[in-house]
């Protein structure tokens, strides 16, 4: 079993990597998907910090609703490459 401190370090590194990828990707759809993954990782971090109510709100609103709104908005606009 992985210790909580080690898991928090791994999640923190993954959070930074996702944040960099969101900024680097040129395709907005890829950026939204990585942003949703970042939000899920953040929810997991909140859960490990013993804040399950904040983790559920982050997972529900941050990952699901925000990503859905962004995807609907991207689909409603014209994609130019």
Image: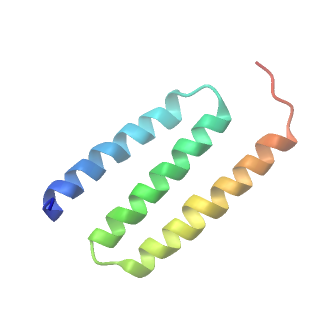
Which residue: 29% across, 52% down? 11
Picture residue at 27% right of the left edge, 71% below the top: 49
Q: How many marks?
A: 0
> Where, quadrant-wise, is the C terminus in this rendering?
top right
Whether residue 41 is situated above or below residue 53 in the rendered picture: above
Coordinates of residue 59 in the picture (x, y in percent): 51, 66
| Residue 41 locus on image (x, y percent) | 40, 56
Location of residue 77 by image quarter: top right
x, y percent for residue 18: 43, 41
Residue name at image x 56 percent, y 59 percent: 63
Is 34 left or right of 81, judged from the image as shown? left
Q: Residue 50 placed where, x, y %? A: 28, 78
Question: Viewed as shown, does residue 14 lie left or right of 4?
Answer: right
Residue lying furthest top in this view?
A: 81
User: In terms of depth relative to the viewer, which is nearer, 37 or 24?
Assistant: 37
Q: Quarter of the image holding residue 62?
A: bottom right
Q: How is the image coloured?
A: rainbow
Q: Is residue 53 left or right of residue 31?
A: left
| Relative height, residue 18 to residue 25 (above, below) | below
Q: Residue furthest front?
A: 1
Residue 38 falls left or right of residue 46: right
Pick the quarter of the image with the N terminus.
bottom left
């Amino acid at each position: 079993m992985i210790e909580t401190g080690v898991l928090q370090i791994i999640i923190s590194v993954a959070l930074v990597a996702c944040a960099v990828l969101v900024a680097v990707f040129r395709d907005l759809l890829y950026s939204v998907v990585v942003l949703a993954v970042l939000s899920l990782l953040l929810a997991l971090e909140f859960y490990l910090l013993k804040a399950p109510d904040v983790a559920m709100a982050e997972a529900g609103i941050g990952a699901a609703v925000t990503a859905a709104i962004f995807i609907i908005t991207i689909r409603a606009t014209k994609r130019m490459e």
